[in-house]
Amino acid sequence: MNLSIGSFVWGVKRIDTETEFWSKALDYQVTYRDVDFAILKPKDGKEGIQLSLKQVTSDHARRHHMDLFTYDQKAEVNRLLALGASRKKWNYEPDADYVVLEDPDGNPFCVVQKG
């Protein structure tokens, strides 16, 4: 098989706010930007999947989310909250290794404890 993920496209309502949030959250740089689309890639040739942000106008649920992996979940959750994320109300199972947050646009994502 010769397929690999080249980019994850994230539908957002506020392209400017989301571009700023995700570039800081992931330590990515903006490599392309126009009125309703942005491409973010890891800085300095680091490994990682490209994130593309596409401005949408629909209020319908966007059925996507990312899992972000870390060895220091508490510190990363606090850092992301300081950048503008918010906690999503969630019914966690007792052994949950993740925390559900929302980006400034309301898109959910998980911060998962590694190890």
Image: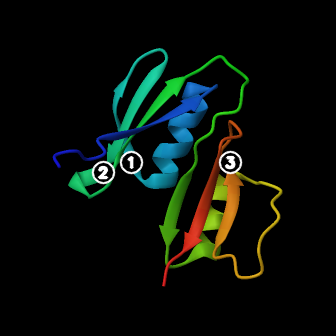
Disc 3 to disc 1: CB gap under 8 Å: no
Q: Amino acid at mark 2?
A: Lys
Q: Residue at x 73, y 23 (%)?
A: 59
Is 55 located above or below residue 100 in the figure? above
Q: Residue at x 58, y 48 (%)?
A: 65
Q: Circle 3 — which element?
A: loop
Earlier residue among tags 3 and 2:
2
Which mark is on residue 28?
1
Q: Amino acid at mark 1?
A: Tyr
Q: Which residue is mark 3?
A: 84
Q: Amino acid at mark 3?
A: Gly
Q: Circle 1 — which element?
A: strand
Q: Counting other residues with Cα less than 10 Å from the Cα at mark 3, is it few (<14), some (14-19), or many (20 or more)?
A: some
Q: Which residue is mark 2?
A: 43
Q: Residue at x 56, y 30 (%)?
A: 11
Earlier residue among tags 2 and 1:
1
Is 100 located above or below residue 60 in the figure? below
Disc 2 to disc 1: CB gap under 8 Å: yes
Left or right relative to 44: residue 108: right
Q: Circle 2 — which element?
A: helix
